[in-house]
């Protein structure tokens, strides 16, 4: 089960923008491309949290959902070109948090 959905992403960016990130033409996002980006982000999350928690996290805490949304959007922007600085920063912040959670587990 994915930690976020396409509809969750649409709370952060307009549908037209999501369509531009996932298709070459049209005003409708390509759900396959969105799903692939969500899977990539969720795999990263699981890689960090898997040493500490049973996966998948069900139900996913709101913070994990937010991390998945930020990381997914970073991946979608990156497939078109360089991600905007705010997306880059949110992605790096998410990774930093995940690393701290993983490090905390290994330091016990």
Image (cartoon, grey):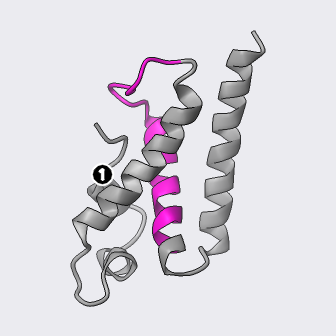
Question: Residue 2, position in %: x, y?
Answer: 32, 42
The quadrant of the picture occupied by the N terminus is top left
Location of residue 34 with respect to 68 vertically, above or below: below
Residue marked by disc 1: 5
Closer to the camera, 44 or 10? 44
Q: Quadrant of residue 16?
A: bottom left
Q: In screen coordinates, is 84 left or right of 17? A: right
16 in the magenta segment: no
Q: Which residues are magenta?
A: 53-77
Q: At 51% from the left edge and 55% from the top edge, which residue is drawn?
A: 70
Q: At 44% from the left edge and 43% from the top edge, which residue is drawn?
A: 42
Q: At 42% from the left edge and 63% from the top edge, which residue is drawn?
A: 12
Location of residue 21 with respect to 12 vertically, above or below: below
Location of residue 91 with respect to 14 vertically, above or below: above
76 in the magenta segment: yes
Q: In screen coordinates, is 82 left or right of 41? A: right
Q: In screen coordinates, is 44 left or right of 27? A: right
């Amino acid at each position: 089960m994915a930690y976020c959905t396409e509809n969750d992403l649409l709370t952060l960016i307009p549908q037209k923008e999501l369509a531009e990130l996932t298709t070459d033409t049209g005003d409708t996002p390509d759900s396959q491309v969105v799903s692939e980006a969500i899977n990539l982000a969720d795999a990263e999350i699981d890689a960090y949290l898997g040493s500490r928690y049973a996966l998948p996290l069900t139900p996913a805490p709101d913070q994990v959902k937010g991390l998945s949304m930020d990381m997914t959007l970073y991946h979608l922007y990156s497939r078109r070109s360089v991600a905007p600085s705010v997306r880059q920063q949110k992605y790096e912040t998410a990774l930093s948090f995940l690393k701290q959670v993983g490090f905390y587990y290994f330091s016990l």
